[in-house]
Amino acid sequence: MNCEEKFHSIYGRDADSISFSPYRICPIGAHSDHNLGKITGFAIDKGIHIAYRPKQNGVVEMTSLQFPKRAQWHIKEVGAKTGDWADYLRGATWALAKKHSLSVGICGVIEGSLPIGGLSSSAAVILAFLDALCKVNRISLSPQELIDVAFDAEKNYVGVNVGTLDQSCEVLSRKNHLLYLDCMDNSYELIPTPENMKPYKIAIFFSGLEHSLAGSKYNMRVDELRAGVYALQAFAGIDYGKFGEANARDVSYEIYEEYRDKLPAPWARRCEHWYTEFKRVEAGAEAWRRGDIEEYGRLSFESGWSSIHNWESGAPEQIQLYEIMRETDGIYGGRFSGAGFKGCCMALIDPDKAETIAETVERKYLSSFPEMKGKYSFHICESADGVRV
């Protein structure tokens, strides 16, 4: 791997070990985890690798193959975020140190196996780094502890109003299983791919536009949903507390139906997405259990439509990719991957038609956005196991 070669060129010796965290996709369940919804998802066989060695002096020294400048801090003096790519790693150090005593740092080189944007690379970076930091400090974390520490780092240090979708998919997933997670109590089911299901592979269509959640409208959309929920509670005479504690899961669909016409239009659309997505996830899990990948794919396409029109996410490039996907034979279903502000689209496809799908989507997409030639890319992936510490 390139990260191993880079490590040797920087430090003049080989790395001691390689840490890996997979990326993830969420075909149904987008924009709902932060309000305690349900999600379905997979880890995929592409992700973040870190080549590293321990540093006994407690210094963390990290280089990325995707970003310039080496980042450095001490495990006991992380400091405030600086706005660069390494904030996710500083946050991971900060969050882990709150629960465990750290004495050993690391030097390492990070490499992503796919372009950045839409596959939860931020969570994957945090998890791969936590894996390395835990190993050199002889710390063992349960899957839920690992999810909680990674979530704490991204939400409370970096400042992104995420739920636990990303971390959960990248930790709990198992190859050839659909993860069905309830974000209210972290209960989950791993639904095996039925023998009667038609064959499928996971396709990633990278638009050529990279993104960052911290700099997108992600936080605004979450606040708009929460504002709608807060208003619904007031209309219905439900006791409510702090704004940040309002969750759509605490307000029934019947209450939403009764009072949604009183909401400002943007808040109503955010609520409409959350409540309908909740129903899509439940229906999607049942479709997967039956082996009905066509129905699961249809619901994923429907989720993408709601993300465009109700959640109002997606750059023009992504919307065009989504529309092309809907018209392409051999694609069961798909949507934006990630928050939907630039990045990529994902799809579940018929493997026998992969070559035709790749050619068709690229030709149509580049005819609309010729400036993306050389930046757009197509990737075929498999489901994978999640990371373990």
Image (tube, helix red, strand yellow):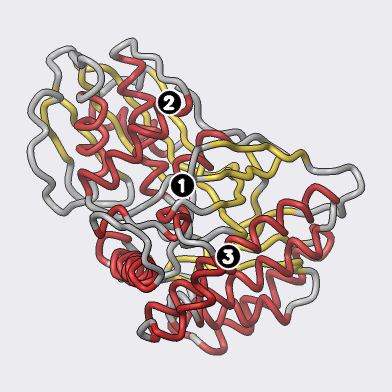
Circles 3 and 1: CB distance less than 8 Å? no
Of circles 2 and 3, which is in front?
A: 3
SS state under label 2 = strand
Q: Residue at the spot x=24%, y=31% of the render?
A: 95
Residue closer to the observer: 130 or 241: 241
- Say which of 45 and 296 sits in front: 296
Q: CA distance from mark 3 to mark 1?
A: 17 Å
- Residue 124 seen in render: yes
Q: Is residue 112 left or right of residue 103?
A: right
Disc 1 residue crowd, few under 14, some 14–19, many 20+, Cα 10 Å: many
Give the residue number, with chain letter if any, for mark 2: 18
Residue hosting label 3: 277
Residue at horizontal 45 percent and vertical 75 percent from the top: 311
Q: Position of residue 192 (x, y in %)?
A: 77, 39
- Crowd around label 2: few <14 · some 14–19 · many ≥20 (10 Å): some
> Which residue has dot 1 on it?
166
| Disc 1 secondary structure class | helix
The C terminus, quarter of image: top left
Residue type marked 3: Glu
- Residue 299 image position (x, y, % from top left): 69, 67
